Amino acid sequence: MKTFDQLGLSSEIVKAIEELGFDQPMPVQEEVIPLLLAKTRDIIALAQTGTGKTAAFGLPIIHKIDVSQKVPQTLILCPTRELCHQISGDLVDYSKYVDGIKILPVYGGSSIESQIRSLKRGVHVIVATPGRLIDLLNRKIMSLDLVHTVVLDEADEMLNMGFTESIDDILSRVPDGRSMLLFSATMPKEIARITKKYMENPKEIVIGRKNEGALNVKHIYYMVAARDKYLALKRIADYYPNIYAILFCRTRRETQEIADKLIQDGYDADSLHGELSQSQRDLVMNKFRNKNLQFLVATDVAARGLDIDDITHVINYSLPDDVESYTHRSGRTGRVGKNGTSISIIHLKEKGKIAQFERAINKSFEKRTLPSGDVICEKQLFNFVDKIEKVKVNDEEIEHLLPSIYRKLEWLEKEDIIKRIVSLEFNSLLEYYNSAEEIIEPTERSSKKGRDDRKSFDRGRDSSRMAEKGYTRIFINIGKMDGANPANLMGFINDHVTEKVRIGKIDLLKNFSFFEVPEEVAPKVVNTFKGLFVEDRKLIVEVAQQPNNNSNTQERKFNKKRRRPKGRRY
């Protein structure tokens, strides 16, 4: 393996990265750096996040900058503000001994005026999110005419976030002869389209296999009934005393609800989702980066581009729909050569999706049984004892306090002191698991009754009245028994449909409901909910049947036959 010096980097760059603790190049760096220094025009690098990609493109970019030309020479596009900030900070560290180089992060949510002032003073490298960059270009504040290198970092993430048109717009404004580097963890069709349109015989580098999961990540799943998912999450959290994790949920509402439950139960947690302001988002991320939080509960969109090296676990409270999303989630842990664990909490019907993910990322998923209360308490206790053994004692600071403490405790034996310390730390945990019932894994037989009950929904799908003019009446198999009311039903619909839907009249019944939406969006609403589950039953959303004389009879039969377990709520 070569050293950074042998790769051809300048002495100033080598000195800076040695101070940062860089010893030898990682595989992606050893492959990419010589190609960029040799002015290879176009490169596609497929590698997981956390494999050293920033240094792979950042070091040769700094090496090639002409600091005497105070114009943008390199453009780096990335999906989120957090990643933009992270990359620019890393480049500043790498260029510590390169005099005069200017690196500017450009992203939304911060003052555009200050970014404009920096651009007017002159910059060499721009690290940008697509939206803010287009804003500056349209204002004629900057030009990309002299850019010789373009980097698309986490390109698949940008496309998933809907930046396809923005990327096309930006790439149309850079010179035809520029070099282009595309870094991605997966290779979806849209990436292939961009490479075909904007690249010329690109050199492809694959670290591992295409779309493969990170090498240092172990994949585990627990199968539980839907009503037990949160209880299972608590057991997982308690089983790993030093857990530092991102917990993924499907919707903004679920994200907030799970974060609130964790906080109420005494865990250090907070939520990250699209309804937070930028200042709130920054506050949460700072707490998580400083390890003042154990759990960051996030949606996929909110967590894209997060670049934190020490995350021990990723927990899929809700499985994603596609393998690319799973790959990105699991790639948040096991970074920079460290080990990580991706845990999924699933119900019986998601077992097939686990098998699909296994094939796609070429990794085996280990099925585990949730730990018992005794095992959890024992593990927590030994972790506590381990901390006592390793705690650093500052004799000088506490010396004057010790005589009083010794006198206060002299009537206790050593064993009594240990017992009291353990009781003080663990009484609430021991009491909880002493009274907690063990969580039983569901089986095909135990779920059969639920499937039989769901067949009776067919009896209730007709409507007792016509929709208002211009509206379509929609059936949904969620009703008052699920805890539904007009407000949370509207919130549930708008959490899933990508654009805000105007909802008309709502009829809430015991086991199901009807709601009205404008005719033009009805097909989109119905298609959005195909294949989704509410807890352990399939969600049924469809255009209501025309009213007939038997509708009330059918509703009575449906309500009579349908029985739901107590305590289950929508």
Image: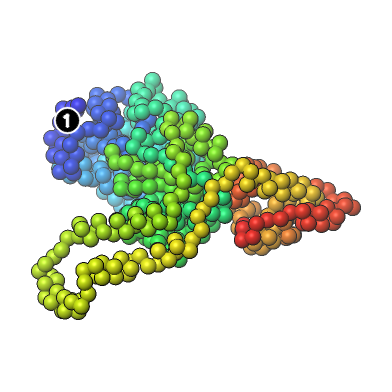
* In the rendered image, the vertical position of residue 197 relative to residue 394, given as above or below: above
From the viewer's perspective, is 256 left or right of 56?
A: right
Q: Using the rendered view, name the quadrant where residue 181 is placed.
A: top left
User: Residue 495 appears at what percent x and percent y?
Assistant: 58, 53
User: Residue 464 appears at what percent x and percent y?
Assistant: 83, 55
**Dot 1: within a 10 Å radius of its alpha carbon, few (fewer than 14), some, or many (20 or more) residues?**
some
| The C terminus sits in image quarter | bottom right
Q: Secondary structure at mark 1?
A: loop
Task: From the image, tell me which residue sits under label 1.
Answer: 3
Q: Using the rendered view, name the quadrant where residue 43 is placed.
A: top left
Q: Residue furthest left?
A: 396
Q: Residue furthest top?
A: 201
The residue under the point 29% across, 31% down is 28
User: Residue 320 appears at what percent x and percent y?
Assistant: 51, 43
The residue under the point 26% across, 59% down is 385
On the question of residue 152 being in view, the answer is: no
Towards the viewer: 283 or 138: 283
The residue under the point 43% across, 30% down is 362
Towards the viewer: 430 or 247: 430
On the question of residue 457 being in view, the answer is: yes
Q: Residue furthest right?
A: 549
User: Residue 459 appears at what percent x and percent y?
Assistant: 79, 49
Q: Using the rendered view, name the quadrant where residue 467 is placed.
A: bottom right
Total labels: the figure holds: 1
* In the rendered image, the vertical position of residue 298 relative to residue 323, given as above or below: below
What amino acid type should be assigned to the residue bearing mark 1?
Answer: Thr
From the viewer's perspective, is 515 left or right of 126?
A: right
The residue under the point 40% across, 25% down is 199
Towards the viewer: 179 or 530: 530
